[in-house]
Image: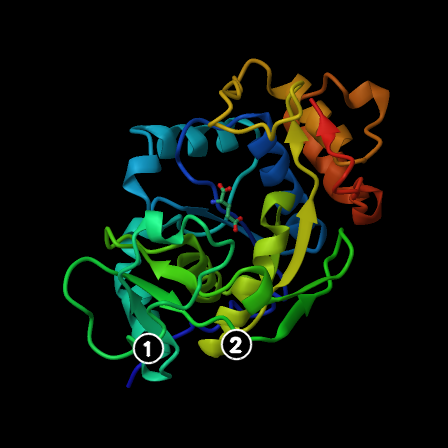
Amino acid sequence: MLGLTIPEPPRGCGYIGRFAPTPSGPLHFGSLVAALASYLDARAHQGQWLVRIEDIDPPRCQAGASDSILQTLDDYGLHWDGNICYQSQQTTHYISALKQLQQQQRLFFCSCSRSQLQAHTTYPGTCRHQLGAPVKGACSYRIQAPDLEIGFDDLIMPTYKENLAQAVGDFILRRKDSLFAYQLAVVVDDALQGITHVIRGADLYQQTPRQIFLQQGLNLPTPTYGHIPLIMNDQGQKLSKQNFAQAITTEAAPALMSQAIQRLGQALPAELVAAPVVDQLSWATQNWNRTLIPCHRQDPIAF
Ligand code: GLU
């Protein structure tokens, strides 16, 4: 019998949130804000807050980054519930999800090279007929995108919908080098961890319909989503490891925590600005108000 076995959620817990960093470097201010938003939303709803290390792409992972991220979360008072989930240990689940989709004849083997696809904005359908056994040579697994609008109501940003075939086209679930794609892993793990609420950066807002489509194909529940504006550097780029965002230090915790709370639109009282992080977090949890989060995608928060 194919299919993912979803564990029963803990009793009495109607809210399970998560922070899911890719360990490509230490935590920076942008990822602190994302971690904090998901933490506060969970705690303000008496929910659990889980951490998942998204280490499925070894070339992107940096040695020591997972431990450093976890240590920084701890130093900043962002204590998680339960065990950490490492995507590198979830391979059997991803394979079982792929098999399930393969049985539905939606997955095909794609041997197109990068240069063959260069001129196309969406996948041109070249290998769509290769539904059965893998073809000779290295190939990726793609899923047929439906000519259908898929949308969702966001807790923070406007409702979003798109036609998957037109906007994205057939997309990859397993790469030619055998690595599993983020889209597959995130959907499987959100379900396996029983996640009910996903609060994360707005760079993933437009990826959500793909995830909902996969959840539907795999018969998995769709969490509630909320996307927070990205923190930008002074060149207008997303604060990220690729753009050499600085690692945050433990010494700076009170100052950066108060900035992070304010970036989320929450009016931290002046007397708490230099207070220990535990006091700031306690105030922010009690006074958390999602509607204050600045939500214009065109109006990213400058750092
Ligand atoms: N791993 C992703 C990142 O670090 C986040 C994925 C998600 O929250 O869905 O940007």
Q: Hey, what amino acid is under mark 1?
A: His
Q: Which residue is mark 2?
A: 216
- Label 2 element class: helix
Q: Hey, what amino acid is under mark 2?
A: Gln
Query: Image quadrant for the N terminus?
Result: bottom left
- Label 1 element class: loop
Residue 209's tag is none
Which residue is pictured at 74% across the width and 42% down the height? 297
Q: Residues within 10 Å of mark 2 (few under 14, many from 20)?
A: few
Q: Earlier in the sequence, mark 1 or mark 2?
A: 1
Answer whether residue 4 is visible to the viewer in this image: no
Judge: label 1 CB < 8 Å from ligand 1: no
Single out the residue that lies furthest toward the left.
136
- Above/below status of 188 relative to 286: below
Q: Which residue is mark 1?
A: 129
Which residue is pictured at 83% across the width and 19% down the height? 271
Q: Position of residue 186 (x, y in %)?
A: 45, 57
Question: Would residue 30 appear left or right of 95 to someone viewing this image?
Answer: right
Q: In this rendering, which labeled residue sits more in front, label 1 or label 2? A: 1
Q: Nearer the viewer, residue 300 or 71?
A: 300
Q: Residues within 10 Å of mark 1 (few under 14, many from 20)?
A: few
Single out the residue that lies furthest toward the bottom.
1
Q: Position of residue 195 (x, y in %)?
A: 54, 61
Q: Nearer the viewer, residue 165 or 233?
A: 165
- Above/below status of 162 relative to 58: below
Which residue is pictured at 67% across the width and 25% down the height? 236
- Above/below status of 69 relative to 112: above
